[in-house]
Image (cartoon, grey):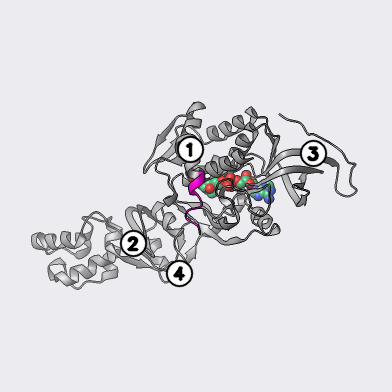
Amino acid sequence: MTGPDTETGAPEPGTGTNRGTTTFDTLILGAGAAGMMCAAEAGRGGGRVLVVDHARAAGEKIRISGGGRCNFTNMHAEPGNFLSQNPHFAKSALSRYTQWDFLDLVGRHGIDWHEKTLGQLFCDGSAKEIIAMLRAEMDAVGADLWLETSVEGVSREGNGFRVALRRGDSRHDVSCRNLVVATGGKSIPKMGATGLGYALAEQFGLPLVPTRAALVPLTFSDATLPRLKALAGLSVDATVETAGTRFREGLLFTHRGLSGPSVLQISSYWTEGQDVVVDLSPDTDLGAHLRQLRAQAGRQAVATALASVLPKRLAQDVADRAAPRGNLADQSDAEIDRITAHAHAWCLRPAGTEGYRTAEVTLGGVDTAALSSRTMEARDVRGLYFIGEVVDVTGWLGGFNFQWAWSSGWAAGQAI
Ligand code: FDA
């Protein structure tokens, strides 16, 4: 581990011990996925690197990700899987540090992995292996890590920066040429998320794209919620669509509303006041199916006929919403189309989302117009970099957000 360059200064009254000023080439704020990746790459260039984090451990979100197995990338990752005001911004970093580069790193560290579904790659063992790998990469280049360290202030100092840090009772000033902001988004504040990255962007005059919770369950008003609650625990394969964007994956009914991968995905595209349209039976043409059953066994109830395709509770709910008169034999073709529309195009108006408390990511953030897409450096503030989730680049569910953290962290590390 590298030690400090200079230690000067005397204790400051009322602020505990002042450990003086330490000089590093690069200071990285945030020891998450992007920060650690950047440290390993920046250190390769020979400069002295310090990573600080206010948490007790590095990579806490990596640790809990993917149910403890970390969905660390996606085999199909490409720029189209990311949301940003500038859809072209992520292209450079994603193409220069790809999912295959990360897989190569994982392989070199002997971490076994598997594809779960849709190109999503997970550790066979534990997400902790990914954290250990990043820590080993940092150690290999002598990057320092200070945990339980908070940032008290940042100021410009010549061509570089001076950052006031606090570790327990003592204050440390760090002077650095490059300052990398890797403090993540606002999701899961309980795990250490703060708005520091956004505040620093504002301090240095970088514009922000408004933030909101994404990859998050949708909530509903009292008019709809009781119906969804009655279905809680049911999970179906469904397509969910809003404003021309559609995902097909699992949908889960919960006591609070709708969740499951298809709903988390669509939440990133949903805005207040919009409907979501759910197809509960994307593979089976229910109209054709009911017409066939009508000819064969028309004396059954509509709910019973629907239950030959949908889970029983859901079939009953579709029938309740359609409220047909009589049994299946009593339904005209037009009536069958009306009934099945309640399953193929169930239109729901969410009241909101569960918010940052449960969101996997934050949409919006540091406006990419203010950053170089090649290096992540602020165009107008030399030496200031923003990487990972704090930037207005948000991936789909499925390993894409970590890939952005690796690619953007690597791009900044390379440039440094
Ligand atoms: P990240 O949040 O990882 O790191 C930021 C670091 O900065 C943290 O260590 C934090 O403590 C520190 N920090 C914040 N404020 C600070 C301050 N004021 N002072 C000092 N330090 C500060 N993605 C994916 O691709 N696959 C997956 O399986 C999952 N799973 C998943 C599960 C859950 C529950 C969540 C919440 C999120 C995911 N994600 C995911 C998303 C993924 O975790 C996320 O996109 C990346 O961790 C972002 O990496 P960053 O390094 O940008 O931020």
Which comes before the other along the chain, label 2 or label 4?
4
Which comes before the other along the chain, label 3 or label 4?
3
- The boundaries of the magenta stretch are 86-93
Say few, some or many: other residues with alpha carbon within 10 Å of mark 1 (under 14 / 14 to 19 / 20 or more). many
For residue 22, which numbered disc appears in the image?
Answer: 3
Which comes before the other along the chain, label 1 or label 2?
1
Q: Tell me, yes or no, whether the two marked residues, 3 and 4, touch with CB atoms within 8 Å.
A: no
Say few, some or many: other residues with alpha carbon within 10 Å of mark 2 (under 14 / 14 to 19 / 20 or more). many
Say few, some or many: other residues with alpha carbon within 10 Å of mark 4 (under 14 / 14 to 19 / 20 or more). few
Q: Residue drawn at (90%, 41%), measured in percent from left and top?
A: 10
Q: Which residue lies furthest to the left in this view?
A: 295
Mark 3 to mark 4 CA distance (whole Å): 54 Å
| Residue 29, image quadrant | top right
As displayed, is residue 365 above or below residue 104?
A: below
Q: Is mark 1 on a helix, strand or loop?
A: loop
Mark 3 to mark 2 CA distance (whole Å): 57 Å
Of 296 and 90, nearer the camera is 90
Mark 1 to mark 2 CA distance (whole Å): 30 Å
Spot occupied by residue 167 in the image (x, y as percentages of width and height): 77, 42
| Direction from residue 333 to residue 119 in the image, left or right | right
For residue 278, which numbered disc appears in the image?
Answer: 2
Residue 185 included in the magenta stretch of the image:
no
Q: Residue drawn at (44%, 49%), measured in percent from left and top?
A: 79
Of the two numbered discs 3 and 2 in the rendering, the one whose residue sits closer to the viewer = 3
